[in-house]
Image (tube, coloured by chain):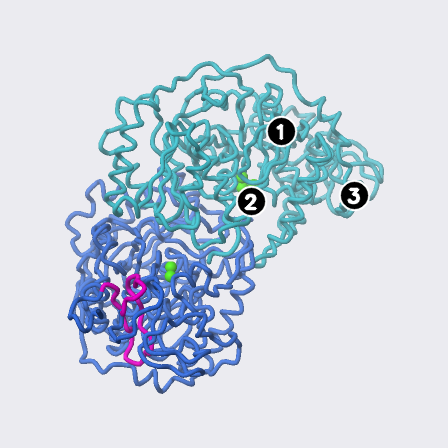
Chain colours: A cyan, B blue
Amino acid sequence: MCAKCSGMTPAAPTLRLHPADNVAVLTARAAAGADPLGCGRPLAVAIAAGHKLATQAIPRGAALRKFGQVIGQATADIGLGDHVHSHNCAFSAHDQDYAIGADLAAAQAMVPVCAPRSFDGYRRADGQVGTRNYIALLATVNCSATVIRRAAAEIEAEGSLQGYTNIDGVIALAHGTGCGMAAAGPGFDILDCVLWGYATHPNVGAAVFVGLGCEVMQIARMRAKAGDAGSDRFHALTIQDSGGTRATIDRIKAHLRAILPQVNQARRSPCPVASLRVGLQCGGSDGFSAITANPALGVASDLLVGLGGTAILSETPEIYGAEQLLLRRASSDAVARKLIDQLRWWQDYAAQGGGSMDNNPSPGNKQGGITTILEKSLGAVAKAGATPLMAVYDYAEKVRAPGFVFMDTPGYDPVSATGQIAGGAQIIVFTTGRGSAFGSKPAPTIKLATNDLLFASMTDDMDLNCGDVVSGGVSLSQKGAAILDLIIATASGAPSKSEMLGLGDHEFLPWQIGAVM
Amino acid sequence: MCAKCSGMTPAAPTLRLHPADNVAVLTARAAAGADPLGCGRPLAVAIAAGHKLATQAIPRGAALRKFGQVIGQATADIGLGDHVHSHNCAFSAHDQDYAIGADLAAAQAMVPVCAPRSFDGYRRADGQVGTRNYIALLATVNCSATVIRRAAAEIEAEGSLQGYTNIDGVIALAHGTGCGMAAAGPGFDILDCVLWGYATHPNVGAAVFVGLGCEVMQIARMRAKAGDAGSDRFHALTIQDSGGTRATIDRIKAHLRAILPQVNQARRSPCPVASLRVGLQCGGSDGFSAITANPALGVASDLLVGLGGTAILSETPEIYGAEQLLLRRASSDAVARKLIDQLRWWQDYAAQGGGSMDNNPSPGNKQGGITTILEKSLGAVAKAGATPLMAVYDYAEKVRAPGFVFMDTPGYDPVSATGQIAGGAQIIVFTTGRGSAFGSKPAPTIKLATNDLLFASMTDDMDLNCGDVVSGGVSLSQKGAAILDLIIATASGAPSKSEMLGLGDHEFLPWQIGAVM
Ligand SMILES: [Ca+2]
Ligand SMILES: [Ca+2]
Ligand SMILES: [Ca+2]
Ligand SMILES: [Ca+2]
Ligand SMILES: [Ca+2]
């Protein structure tokens, strides 16, 4: 008896992810003899969750579509209800003959027309808008990690922040590098860019740089960038000039007490959502990531782009192999070329220390129903929706273009989010299936659960459940709209779960490239 | 009028570093016409501090000796009192024709005969001896950094450690890696080795590993190493299994409360100094490093070796170019070969990201009076004294041989010290000229100032002044004996300056090698 005829909820429900798709995904195991599509063609053998069934007859040579995208071609005639996998679906070898911009017009048509929306943000003198108002203590080197952490902890414990209700806190941005590194080159440039990006972040009302004194990453560099104009906003001191650990902590605290009244003058006011830059993240992914939270976040990204805002996709190792899709919707040849160059750089980089970019579906992936490398990467890229690729940025580079953009980062969550925040992201949205305790400052992180079980088991950490896209019949459009509402509420000051837990003080992690000397 | 004749303290004093030397170092600038050696041969031109003068006539072709070592050959006849520098001294090109073991007998003769000494240490079940008694919380990945830091802070703030007077504290060993990395290869092996090295460190009474759950560095690895025998000493849990951030913090704290009574049963008792492993470090070096604190620490290292203990030299980039000296006193061919292999590996490694191992004296070094690459590296190697090189270890490898040993590490202080502590060092001794706020746990750091000015300006941070070797006529032998006394007192429980300041919670920094994926 098929579910359609009986009117019962099917034992093995399926999910069709996009109206253009000709396959549906099994969201639970289907037994032999079951008819999960309710189409009158029972399965000959049991099929595991995550695998695909054809929702119509597909002739040999025709395109197979999932997420609204081509994931491969039929290598045999496929009947309605047939299992679609390696035996009847293949993707032609991944080559470098990119069709740059071929889908640009189609992607432009995907930008939704939205009535303007606003959120309550901190409008800064440079035109940027903050979603929080922090004071940042920035270590130029690990040698000053302890003094900035101690100063931040003591100033709070002493109650010195009380009464300054417009300040979200003092954050200590400590890290493990800044010396024992080449004094020029990509590793140096990245740290320089990250520190300056955080110091000038719209969620930061004032920045205090603290060094040891003899480190490679000299504080004078930051002083020079700040210039005379920055004298209210940027401050700097070193341990060697201040008389040691205790004296430096006291000097930082005196600085903080002096600048608190000024930083507290910031006020929230209605600002266009167009000024929001949202960093897209996933970590601890599972079989539900690609069918619930990631595509729902893609809908939210499209809405954000429709409102004039910016959605930042990253995690280069996870888009590798699916770059054609991004290149086809690139807004210009220059944008496409920058992405191609980044991917070439990664091939050499990954080889350091024995890694590899070869993410062709692994045996484990194939068991889970992933047929082609394109299909695999589409799960990650789904977070970014369907609009044109407007710009490509290097790690921690200032993001200026509105729309959907890409920033080159590793897939490792804290390093990736640090690059996005340095680039100006005021909110991070993070999907997870296995669970994550990630949080970030000064830009807060919102976490989306891909499945009901995770949402129930880590309820203190998860902001929103996307599991009901499978379990509760919630549409991706509805879920995407709910995610956008949550982004706007959080941007306006509502605390995220990770903020309530106080996370974000130990997840600042600049990408470290090159030898430690 | 020369100082010798007048009986006055010379305006520009000199220091002869070793009885075998034929040069002395100016410890202050000498004006034209001055006679700093008091030998009746006034200078024709002014000479800056740090430069060398001949203490006897040296014929062309003869060896020039500083630190008791050959630093080059005279390229011209040199008269008593002459300035010795690039114009009359050179070192033949650094070649790979090593004279392995050539100076071994001479080095063996440098091991002092000492009456046995003891310190009050914690004798562990495995025969190792601790100088402190900590509980270690170890993150397998950055994703669990916040929960372990929070648990350690809360358990202390709640007063749960009160009454456990034999426990030095709970340390949270958080770091930035553990995922986004290759699951095999040198980067993975190093982190594995560091975590296990800290967990089994004699200064650690019990270890609790905390992971997220889905990271590359799986906690099951640590569980397997601990085995059944380790059930009292090793504990492990993950955030994904524990129900999220808050529930994990509470679970860690419950674990801690349960094990405190057991860990508190440790007691200090007299143990031979032979069980001490001391990590040698320098950072923020200056012109005095090579003539005061470093050679004084070398005397202490020799005394420690004479007592059967272990002195660990590291910082491979700083011995590069002087490896011949270490190879000549290598105890075996295998020991020598391991060091040669490490140096070859570094040449490739340093090239990543644009670095270089080419530390030939820079123009700045030459202005400061450093003539040859050998002379430069001797300043760093001076910390290790003059006894045979008994073993060569990889980063974080368990140090088992007594005597003077080498461990391959970067020069960057926190990364280098982390490797030494993972290898079992129970004390770190750190020389600095420009000043440092370094500290470490569970093994404490003692800091030696190379000059009076630093000691006065960072008095809260510096444990001992070695500046009086120049300013106060204290001999290197006296200073070395004082350093050994301080090592023994600190090992017995006297807090070092960095411990009194509470440093060491943010300086745990495993060497990160390979791509961040
Ligand atoms: Ca991510
Ligand atoms: Ca991901
Ligand atoms: Ca990730
Ligand atoms: Ca050094
Ligand atoms: Ca160093």
- Seen from the viewer's position, the closer of residues A460 and B423 is B423
Residue at image mark 3: A97
Q: CA distance from mark 3 to mark 1?
A: 23 Å
Magenta segment, principal secondary structure? loop
Q: Amino acid at mark 1?
A: Phe
Q: Quadrant of residue B386?
A: bottom left
Q: Chain of mark 3?
A: A
Q: Earlier in the sequence, mark 3 or mark 1?
A: 3
- Seen from the viewer's position, the closer of residues A439 and B78 is B78
Residue at image mark 2: A410
Q: Is residue A286 visible?
A: no
Q: Which residues are magenta?
A: B11-35
Q: Is residue A346 visible?
A: yes
Residue at image mark 1: A404
Q: Earlier in the sequence, mark 2 or mark 3?
A: 3
Image marks 3 and 1: residues in contact by CB distance under 8 Å: no
In the rendered view, does A122 fall on the left or right side of A96? Answer: left
Secondary structure beneath dot 1 equals strand
